[in-house]
Amino acid sequence: MILFVLDACAAVRRYFPDIGTANIDQIFDYPDSLLVLPNIARAEVVSAIIAAYNAILIDESKLNLAQEKS
């Protein structure tokens, strides 16, 4: 088993594509991996997703999908 510790920026890349998204997707798909996120990171990720929704960067369906996965 491999332990991966993600910060909020890495976790947000799961929802908002950028240069590091492919790497994050590989980590999520890696067999027998365990992902660790500090408690504060979840709030930061939700905040980033809501900010993107408020800035009309994502629509309501993507907002709901992200909230289901978080």
Image (cartoon, grey):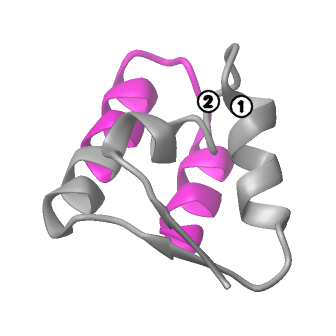
Which is nearer the eye, 42 or 64? Answer: 42
Which residue is the site of mark 1?
Answer: 21
Which residue is the site of mark 2?
Answer: 16
**Which segment is the magenta one?**
46-70
Q: Is residue 34 magenta?
A: no
Mark nearest the camera among 1 and 2 is: 1
Seen at 56% across and 73% down, the residue is: 68
Q: Amino acid at mark 2?
A: Phe
Query: Relative to residue 37, is residue 18 drawn left or right?
Result: right
Q: Label 2: few (<14), some or many (≥20) within 10 Å? A: some
- Residue 44 at what x, y percent from top left? 23, 46
Q: Quadrant of residue 66?
A: bottom right
Any mark on residue 33, and which? Answer: none
* SS type, badge 2: loop
Q: Is residue 42 above or below residue 59?
A: below
Which is nearer the eye, 43 or 2? Answer: 2
Seen at 44% across and 31% down, the residue is: 53
- Residue 20 at what x, y percent from top left? 66, 24
* SS type, badge 1: helix
Q: Are marks 1 and 2 in contact (CB under 8 Å)?
A: yes
Query: Relative to residue 54, is residue 19 drawn left or right?
Result: right
- Residue 3 at what x, y percent from top left? 53, 73
Query: Relative to residue 20, is residue 12 drawn left or right?
Result: left
Q: Amino acid at mark 1?
A: Thr
Q: Is residue 22 above or below residue 37?
A: above
Q: Quadrant of residue 2?
A: bottom right
Q: Label 1: few (<14), some or many (≥20) within 10 Å? A: some
Which is nearer the eye, 57 or 40? Answer: 40
Q: Is residue 33 above or below residue 60?
A: below
Seen at 62% across and 41% down, the residue is: 15
Mark sitting earlier along the chain (1/2):
2
Q: Is residue 49 magenta?
A: yes
